[in-house]
Image (cartoon, helix red, strand yellow):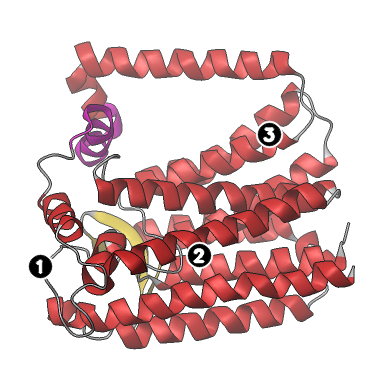
Amino acid sequence: MKKVINSNYLLFIPLFLIMGISLLNMQNARILSDLYQYNLLKQIIFFIIGLMIIFIIKKLNITILLKYSFYYYLFSVILLVLVLFLGKNINGSNAWFDFGFFSFQPSELTKLTLALYLSDVVAKNKANFMLILKVLIITLIPSILVFLEPDTGAIIFYFLIALAVLIVAPIKRVWFLVLAFIILSLFIGFILLYLYKRDLLINLIGTSFFYRVERLITFKTESSYQLENALVVMGSATLFGSGLNKVSLYIPEAPTDFIFAFNIGNFGIISGLLVLFCYLLIDLYLLNKYFVIKNKKIKLVLISFISIFFFQQFINIGMNLGLLPIIGIPLPFLSYGGSTIIIYFAFLGIILNMVKKNVF
């Protein structure tokens, strides 16, 4: 157990490096626009809050804390309902509660509460088709609410969490085949509507959401001003970049969606490789814990976080390189954004607590 406890601290070395690089980029972002003037200060606050959350969660009785996972899930669903009516509209989406100096996105909190609740459900129920239905219903409720905002990125993560916990559960393959058939049928139906009854599809899902889906289907990235500038910045980057308080070219959404390209332009190819290496170390740490730990519930929580954490890296970097559609997904701990940062710190705190005490 001593080796497991000591190895947990190794996680913070690459994490602190990513955080430090993030702060340097937030300083450079102030040059881009007045909109980013307070990003550095806010990011520091987010990191401090996140580290405090890890410290607090590690001191709690995790067994009691996770006993009420259903109520956390219910609370996040209520927030998703409220944000539709009380949330601030940003870029056509009612997804944030605005508190003046900062805003909060309930869909990010739902990633955590959904993962905890689904892990609890899968751990306590028999692995059969009824379990699949329960998981799908639990996942569909927040997905429908987020669909109404709309926020396609969050929905992808919810179903990714559901798929991850179902794969870990010892469910017979025949039920996965049945589920795959249902999903495939729905997908084919959607594609047929898209090809032959587009007006009906727009009436069903709305113009805004249709545009987002169409962008995924048609892979429209080549005409993006953001992407063009990001590729120019990375293609012309030197080994050590333009340096602190210098920006080579303007990139829209540089502190969030295009932070990877922005970082390479600012601090060079070396910085980009360092970021990738840090993520690799964190991924390997989490995967190592997943394969070492035998407890089912710990594995379920771990696989939930591993799936969304890795997927978020993959999608964001793919977006920056022009290999994947631009769907507004930030890079964990590097991009600016309080909701994502704080929730991921909470995830890490819960995982470190569970691994340390080897509960359940």
> What kind of element bears circle 2?
helix
> What kind of element bears circle 3?
helix
Residue marked by disc 3: 166
Residue type, numbered disc 1: Leu
Relative to 301, 149 lies left or right = left
Q: Nearer the viewer, residue 216 or 144?
A: 216
Residue type, numbered disc 2: Cys
Secondary structure mostly taken by the magenta-highlighted segment of the chain: helix
Q: On the image, which quarter does residue 285 sit in?
A: bottom right
Residue marked by disc 1: 249
Write the start and end of the magenta stretch as one range: 204-220
Q: Where residue 307 appears, x then y in whole percent? A: 57, 46
Mark 1 or 2, closer to the camera: 2
The residue carrying pointer 2 sits among few (fewer than 14), some (14 to 19) or many (20 or more) residues within 10 Å by Cα, namely some
Q: Is residue 334 above or below residue 203?
A: below
Residue marked by disc 2: 278
Q: Is residue 327 above or below residue 34?
A: above
